[in-house]
Amino acid sequence: MNFFSRRRHPAEDCASDLANILQYQLTRLNLAYRSKKDGVDVLQCVEFVEPLIAYPNEVRIEVDVSRLPRGVDIPSLKDSKVLETLSAACKRPVRFEDKKTGKGSWYVIEMNEQSNIPRMVKFSSMRQPEKSPPLIIPVGVGQQKEQRWEDLRKLPHLLIAGATGQGKSVMVNAILCHLIRRWPPEMLQLWLVDLKGGMELSYYEGLPHLPKGRFVTKSVDLPAMLAELQTEMERRTDLLRGNARDVDDYNAQQPKDKRLPYIVLIVDEIANAMLNKSRVMLDGQKMSIAQASEFLMADIAARARATGIHLIISTQRPSVDVVTGLIKANFPCRIAFGTASEVDSRVIVDDSSAHGLTVGRMRFRRNMELLELQAPYLDDSEVRKIIRQVLAGDYQPEAVMSAEDIARAEIGYLLSLAESRCGRRFAVRELHKLTQGLVSRDRIEVLSARLEQEKIIKRQWGPRPSIINVSARQWQAKYPPCVLRPASGSLPPKSTPMPIEEPIVQPEDTTPEPELSPAMATFFQGLNDDHHVTTPSN
């Protein structure tokens, strides 16, 4: 027994374990050299310089550059995909530092917690942001408990994948429950496909949002439903062509009884259809269910955004024969829960970091952005409670303003301020101060460009601001005056109210004052309540 041996510090053991993980993963990635010597296979791996350096916040492992295996160089060691694999294996962020002054190259492993994301997020704790767009859906909670909401119109489709029991069905339930309690049946239709035999989405079968015959439980019936949805998409395209650029613009021009509802198609476990080789008829041709489903989904996903049709697809088998390249190309926004292998994670989000995630934790790929989030959780009792409330009629859907309605309200508010307090000048900087932060300066410039195209305001030469080019009654007929309410109980801290000047006492005039229109009188009354502005009396 060696009495002079030193007991190793826990940090040294941790650094040694991490070095072994790095060496093993680099060997798996073929960053090694295999040869034979005297008939024996010899494996030359990437070596590290002793001693390993361990700090409280990070571990620094120096690569022995002088003994690199044949065919392995520094650029291959710091490749982004290699670092992604090492980070997933170590469960901590790994970066590579290359010292060009000859002092060596290092793998730096951050020992702090990878994120401050909570482990459990209840669906009831998600708070929808103010002035949110129509089809906003909850995605999850990220760093510093920041809630992530996304507009389904901009995604415009969503692919959810992961291993069994990782939270895919819970995520689908959260999206559905939020949509049905926010939208009335006249403005939202749900087309549901539950290929698990109807076990997951059977709660929603009796909802008024679900048209008759729009609940499918067998993969054989999926191509027929997709063909009907394709026909509806073509019909809407004909309505919008030449009249509007999207369904929101079209609905803004129509009365409420003629507006087109949003359609959300949700397919749970698409793998049962993508692996079904039974033959069906499509456009007079025989093809397998997998081929027909892939062709129709790709066509709908590519052209349905402007018509108000959106797809949400989930699967627990994210292989290349299920999530094909044609489908993946039309679903730029994807969610990966914990996967069984790194290959499955790469198929979904083009990154291996989803392998080995805990239950409810996800990787959210939004175009080029990759985020780590915790999905909202709600159990079956909450789902049944929300559905009972909607069916009983004692739960009123939330009043929602479309993007066009919000723009019209903001324009009416700005034009009223320009008419009453700016001398009919539509000055961006002056209006931004008068709104006290309710409308941003960039937003006012966007609305100003719109009003210029509609010839309601006219730009002047030089630095002079634009002016209102039509009479008050003309612009009030299109944009009724209104008063915007603050998003929360208090105004933004950086905005300070405009000082109120004392009214100048003028000598009495025998000329009678012109009477205000009812719309302007209502605007002044609301402006008094919100901004404490002195207004003329009738």
Image (cartoon, rainbow, N blue to C red):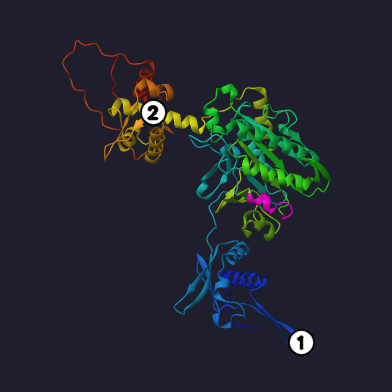
Nearer-the-camera pick, 28 or 357: 28
Magenta region: which residues? 319-329
Residue 326 sits inside the magenta stretch: yes
Left or right of residue 275: residue 120: left
Residue 330 in the image: above or below residue 44 = above
Q: Which mark is residue 39?
A: 1
- Above or below, comparing residue 81 to residue 449 in the picture: below
Location of mark 2 (residue): 413
Q: Is residue 469 left or right of residue 141?
A: left
The total of numbered circles placed on residues is: 2
Determine crowd level at label 1: few under 14, some 14-19, many 20+ residues with C-alpha closer than 10 A. Answer: few
Q: Is residue 200 visible?
A: no
Q: CA distance from mark 2 to mark 1?
A: 85 Å
Which element carries disc 1, helix, strand or loop? loop
Q: Is residue 291 magenta?
A: no
Closest to the observer: 348 or 494? Answer: 348
- The quadrant in which residue 258 appears is top right
Q: Is residue 236 above or below residue 111?
A: above
Instruction: Indicate the amino acid at tag 1.
Output: Gly
On screen, residue 525 versus residue 403, left or right, reads left
Front tag of 2 and 1: 2
| Residue appearing at x 55%, y 58% in the figure | 114
- Extreme residue toward the left, this view: 507
Q: Earlier in the sequence, mark 2 or mark 1?
A: 1
Question: Does the rendering let one see residue 300?
Answer: yes
Q: Residue furthest right?
A: 278
The residue type indicated by label 2 comes to Tyr
